[in-house]
Amino acid sequence: MQSTISTDQPPDFPPLHPQLIQELRAAVADLQDADPWAGLVRFISLGGLTLGMTILTWKTDHISLFILGAIATSLVYAFWLICNHDATHRRLTGWEWFDILMPRLISWPMLWPVGTYNQLHRLHHGWNGIDLRDPERVQWTTVEYLAAPAWQRWYIRHQWPIDILIFGGIGLIVRTFSQGIKQQNNAPHLRQQMLIDVVGIIGTQAAIFGIVALQMLSVWQYLLFWIVLERGIGIIVQTRDHLEHYGLWQQTTSYQITQLYACRNLTTPQWVNWLMGGLPYHSVHHAFPKIAYRRLPEAFQRIQAVLFRHQLPPLPTSLGYIATSLHLSGQTSLILASLTPHAIASLDTTNLNASNLDATN
């Protein structure tokens, strides 16, 4: 079944009032302090649960129970790793040493280059909706789609299930290292962080295999455990990555307004917001990244009130992670990009004729 193809359709904005940005900043000015104890409780709770489930999983003698335990562990581990996002902004605890060290200790066992991600994430915050070089952009442009060979266009039309269910965690790792190499000249510390990640990952894996050998555990069982973790973590994190911005690429005359409308917010229960570290309120986070995750729901309401007073559209909001994922995975949304003479000359006319791309907007 072929997905529907369309291009992003940004809302029509009335002229922005000169005082709008000042009002938005004033509305959330008292919400931007770090909340160290809340972040620490979240990190320790998820970490303790992950380690406890790991121990219980390894105590079972039945392979079926071992796999089920690994699946359950992967779900909790994924939310533990999502704490790294707050740490990137120094808003997990606000303690510099903790927010730098702890993400590495929990990421390297899964080969996740968290230091590299930290540098790329800074570029993402500056370029989202503005610069197509954004290292976290998962959405393709009309130019990229039309210039792609047939197999790649098929992948773009089925990107969601392929990225989430097939590429998973390994896909995220490869993409992060690839973007790290590509963006070296745009972030001065990228080379250093990539080297630290490589050395840290190798050292961590050597230590883990040493423990497996000393405890006379099965290497194959460890590899099975790791693969199950990678699958579960990959599904959750890939889904989150795709939901945050897909179909919302747009640029306005204001950086903060661009961030507010080029991000997706999700209506979720409070416990989901806790697990995701406030990321369901992604517009607010992008516009004001210093706000701690516990204060994002309140900031969201305040910002909505300011936008309403200025007769601006409400922030993009969808209902829940699962429902929104199922909806978006059935359609292909492309960023409407201009066709330069060079791009037109390089296009395969067969691709142009075969595509049912609706790029008239």
Image: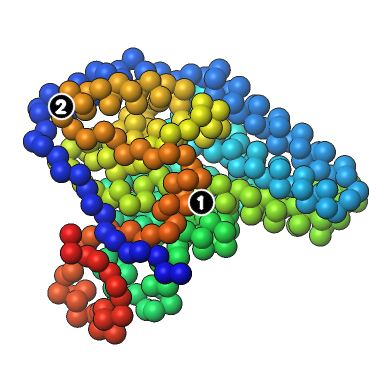
Badge nearest the viewer, 1 or 2: 2
Q: Please name the residue that numbered disc 1 is placed on.
A: 238
Q: CA distance from mark 1 to mark 2?
A: 35 Å
Give the residue at x 43% y 77%. 151
Tell me the colour scheme of the image. rainbow
Give the residue at x 61% y 22%. 41
- Give the farthest residue toward the top: 30
Q: Please name the residue that numbered disc 2 is placed on.
A: 310
Residue 50, relative to residue 293: is it above or below?
A: below
Q: Report if residue 171 is visible in the image.
A: no
Find residue 156 and report its horizontal and vertical position in percent: 40, 66
Residue 97 vs residue 149: left or right?
right
Residue 125 vs residue 34: left or right?
left
Q: Secondary structure at mark 2?
A: loop
Give the residue at x 30% y 18%. 29
Give the residue at x 83% y 53%. 64
Q: Nearer the viewer, residue 348 or 124?
A: 348
Circle 1 residues within 10 Å: few <14, some 14–19, many ≥20? many
Circle 2 residues within 10 Å: few <14, some 14–19, many ≥20? some
Find residue 2 and report its horizontal and vertical position in percent: 42, 69
Identify the mark nearer the N-term, 1 or 2: 1
Q: Secondary structure at mark 1?
A: helix
Q: Nearer the viewer, residue 48 or 90?
A: 48
Q: Report if residue 252 is visible in the image.
A: yes
Q: Amino acid at mark 1?
A: Gln
Residue 247 vs residue 161: left or right?
left
Find residue 71 and report its horizontal and vertical position in percent: 71, 47
Residue 283, relative to residue 70: is it above or below?
A: above
